[in-house]
Structure formats: structure tokens, C-alpha cells
Image (cartoon, rainbow, N blue to C red):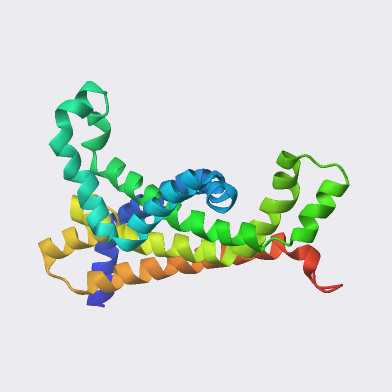
């Protein structure tokens, strides 16, 4: 009974942290999703200087720990307070939530760009040639042929990336963001009730399970034209 008593006492704060975790993950993933299609096109078919610049950015993001990136932005921005104040940006960078969202967006964008690049390059050349043969313009081919196929191919990997981002969002607690892990650490520091970490783990598991269900539902909808007759 003691476990359920502590759960009832901790649940409001844990749910508050859960909302912050979902906001961090959702905003970071959404910003990355908005930027990655254009960057993936440049990465796949752009001019060489653009490809080299993108390769350097992606290599840096994938080759350095997310925690180091978070520290660089949150603590490093303080070294440029005067310059950021002059630009009117200090109010943004002094907020740990904003810094965390920015870092998560930049990090996820690198991974989503590479995932989409693979999807774009996996689109059959014959489909693109067929679209040209019927008179489609390049923007129309991208909108109606390339990106629909690329997203269908890349969809499972994009889902995995968002799940990893959600779990990595726990690092935001280190820079005083009260997400789910931040609330968990706060509760533990006051009560020394170790079961709160188990309660947080269960909440992370529930979030992940719900996301996987919704993502697979969307995947089935995207691929329903490929299903066997009578199973769509």
C-alpha cells in the first residue's frame, strides 16, 4: 500500500513533468521535421558546397554527445550575453526550456535529414521518369512522387528517432528544466523515496507505447494502397 500512497502523492508533479517532456519532444521534433525535407534534398542532390556544409553539420551532431551540445548552448550562450542582448536574443537563451528545445531541434534535424536522404535516394528512378513523361514539373514530382515515397520508406526510422529524442529529453533536467526526469529528481531529493524512479520509468513506457501505436497506425494508413485485397 505504501507504493500506491507515494504514487498518489507524486502523480500530480510527475504528470506536470510529463507535459513538459511532451512539449520538449514535440517542439524539437516538429521544428526538425519542418527543416529536414529541404536539407535532405540538398544533401542528396544539392551543389557540392551545400553538401559539404551539411555533411560537416551532421557529422558534428552525430559525433558529439547530446549533453555536450546542451551545455554548449545553455552555458556557452552566457559568454556572449552582451552580443545576444544587442541582438535581442538574450531573453531567449537565458530560458533553459528554450535552449533545450533549440538543441533538441538541431540534433533531431541532423538525424531526420539523413533518414530522409536515404528515403529520397531509395525512390525508384523509373517512377520519377514516368512522372516527367506525363509532364509533371519538378515541384510537382517532389510533392506527388518523391516525398510521399520517401516518407513511406523512412517512416519507421523517423519514429525511432522521435522515441530516442523523447528519452534523451531527460537530459534537460540537468539544466534545470522540470520535465518528467526533473520532477522525479526533485521529488527524490525531498523524500528519498527511490520508487519514484520506477514510477517515472512506467510513465516513459506509457508515452512510448502510445506513440508507437499511433505511429504504426499512421504507417498503415500511408501504406494501405499496398495491402492485399480485403486487408486495407
- Which residue is pictured at 66% across the width and 61% down the height? 152
On screen, residue 84 versus residue 216, left or right, reads left
**Can you see residue 28?**
yes
Please determine whether, in this image, residue 142 is positioned above or below residue 14: above
Q: Quadrant of the C terminus?
A: bottom right
In percent of width and height, residue 217 lies at 64, 64
Please name whichever residue, 203 or 167, is drawn nearer the observer in this view of the structure: 167
Furthest residue toward bottom: 1
On screen, residue 17 versus residue 186, left or right, reads right
In percent of width and height, residue 216 lies at 61, 66
In percent of width and height, residue 181 lies at 26, 61
- Which residue is pictured at 44% across the width and 64% down the height? 163
Q: How many marks?
A: 0
In percent of width and height, residue 193 lies at 16, 71
Q: Quadrant of the N terminus?
A: bottom left
Q: Quadrant of residue 120?
A: bottom right
Amino acid at each position: 500500500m505504501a507504493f500506491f500512497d507515494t504514487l498518489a502523492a507524486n502523480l500530480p508533479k510527475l504528470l506536470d513533468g510529463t507535459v513538459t517532456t511532451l512539449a520538449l519532444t514535440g517542439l524539437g521534433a516538429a521544428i526538425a521535421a519542418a527543416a529536414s525535407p529541404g536539407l535532405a534534398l540538398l544533401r542528396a542532390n544539392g551543389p557540392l558546397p551545400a553538401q559539404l556544409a551539411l555533411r560537416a553539420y551532421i557529422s558534428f551532431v552525430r559525433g558529439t554527445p547530446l549533453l555536450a551540445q546542451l551545455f554548449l548552448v545553455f552555458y556557452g550562450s552566457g559568454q556572449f550575453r552582451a552580443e545576444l542582448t544587442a541582438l535581442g536574443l538574450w531573453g531567449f537563451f537565458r530560458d533553459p526550456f528554450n535552449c533545450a528545445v533549440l538543441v533538441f531541434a538541431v540534433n533531431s534535424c541532423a538525424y531526420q535529414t539523413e533518414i530522409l536522404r536515404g528515403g529520397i535516394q531509395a525512390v525508384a528512378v523509373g517512377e520519377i521518369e514516368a512522372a516527367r513523361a506525363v509532364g509533371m514539373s519538378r515541384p510537382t514530382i517532389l510533392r506527388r512522387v518523391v516525398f510521399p515515397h520517401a516518407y513511406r520508406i523512412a517512416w519507421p526510422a523517423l519514429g525511432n528517432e522521435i522515441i530516442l529524442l523523447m528519452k534523451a529529453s531527460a537530459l534537460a533536467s540537468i539544466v534545470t528544466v522540470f520535465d518528467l526526469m526533473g520532477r522525479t529528481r526533485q521529488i527524490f531529493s525531498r523524500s528519498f523515496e527511490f520508487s519514484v524512479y520506477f514510477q517515472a520509468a512506467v510513465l516513459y513506457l506509457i508515452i512510448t507505447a502510445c506513440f508507437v501505436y499511433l505511429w504504426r497506425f499512421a504507417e498503415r494508413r500511408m501504406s494501405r494502397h499496398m495491402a492485399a485485397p480485403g486487408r486495407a
